[in-house]
Image (cartoon, rainbow, N blue to C red):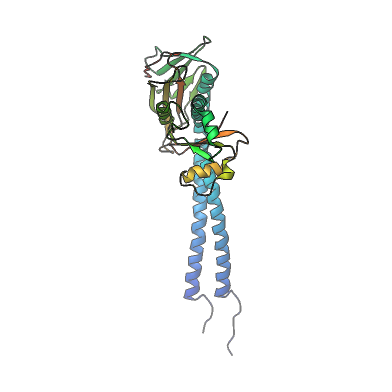
Amino acid sequence: MNNKGFTMVELIVSFMLTSIIVIILVQIIINLKEIYEYSDVKTELLTKQATISNRINEQLLNKQLSNIEECDDIVNYCLNFMFTDGSMTKLIVDTSNQTITIGNDKIKLADDSYFGKIDASITPLANVAENKNDSILKIQVDIEHDYFEDQNFGLYLVYQYDYQKMNLSYLNFG
Amino acid sequence: MKKINNKGFMLVETLVCATFIVGILIVVYVQFRNIDQSYEDSFKYNTVNNLYLANQARIYLNENGLENLKTALTNNDYIDITTCPAAYLEEVNYCKQLFLDLNIKQIIFSEYDLKDKLQEQDNNLSLELLTFIQRVNLIDEGYVIYIEFNDDTYAILKVF
């Protein structure tokens, strides 16, 4: 009798065990590939979001806002922030060139990202005690990327103020 | 006379080796998944945008009931202020509108060492928020707010 070779049972068991090992290794490689592909893009998106957010929020924290007006720019979304120390900062969203400008800093969107919803709103609340914040300003500039659905890498700014000190009840961002 | 071929492995030997290798690979894969999950979670914790939003919540608390909250902590590990409880906070309607505009899903006020006091499971806190509290260890004194936002991101901020 020729005893060389493998039995059927040995072959099946070996094949099954090899398959399990290969599947686990392939899954690890797929995950690593995804991390490699997407991490660069996500890091850039988050870095730009942090830059945009820092630029505008630092000014709002360190200075006293006196008024906000729409700019004369009829092409872009534009707001002019005016402070009690006499300084001004413009926020310009240029959807055609894919840039957002805050003061002197112009930031270009990451490749393949695009603007989503752009909006500003003011919510004044009645019956709030004097000398307390009683109005809420909200500015939203969404930045999206197809790789990351349902994630927003844009600016979402909320600012509280006292209506008695800054008489602002309406804003048209557009 | 029958010649016995002793070259090669027995089935038992093969099974034992393969099981050992598969076991190691499963452990490696599980550890890799944990690292991958931590990597994903790192993008959700304390983003710059969220910290500024948390700061707006802090501004509100400083004006409207912070001392009440500090006093209430003598009897509680943390206080859930998501619904703006009138027992602690002032200007409740303003608070509700503010938390809505800040996209806050849940916000709790506590001392900095809440991590050491929390049970593994707390029915009042989501599992993700519990995980965030357990993982983040940035503040070593005073009072803090932990915030879970509607977009599944989280922030912690010290309250003065």
Q: Residue at x 52, y 17 (%)?
A: A104
- Confirm whether residue B79 shows in the render: yes
How many numbered marks are there?
0
Name the residue at the bottom extreme. B1
Viewer-side residue, B126 vs B41: B126
Instruction: Kindly indicate the quadrant of the structure image that contains residue B17.
Output: bottom right
Residue B152 position within the rendered picture, expressed as x and y whole percent measured from the top left: 45, 39
Q: Nearer the viewer, residue A79 or B76?
A: B76
Above or below: residue B135 compared with residue A138: below
What is the residue that sits farthest to the top in this orientation?
A86
Q: At x 53% / y 21%, what residue is drawn?
A: A61
- Where does the C terminus of chain A fall, quadrant-wise? top left
> Can residue A35 be seen by looking at this rendering?
no
Tell me if residue B152 comes above or below residue A90 in the rendering: below
Q: Position of residue A165 (x, y in %)?
A: 46, 13
Nearer-the-camera pick, B13 or B76 = B76
Residue A156, image x, y percentages:
45, 27
Query: Where does residue B130 sit, x and y in percent of width and height?
Result: 51, 44
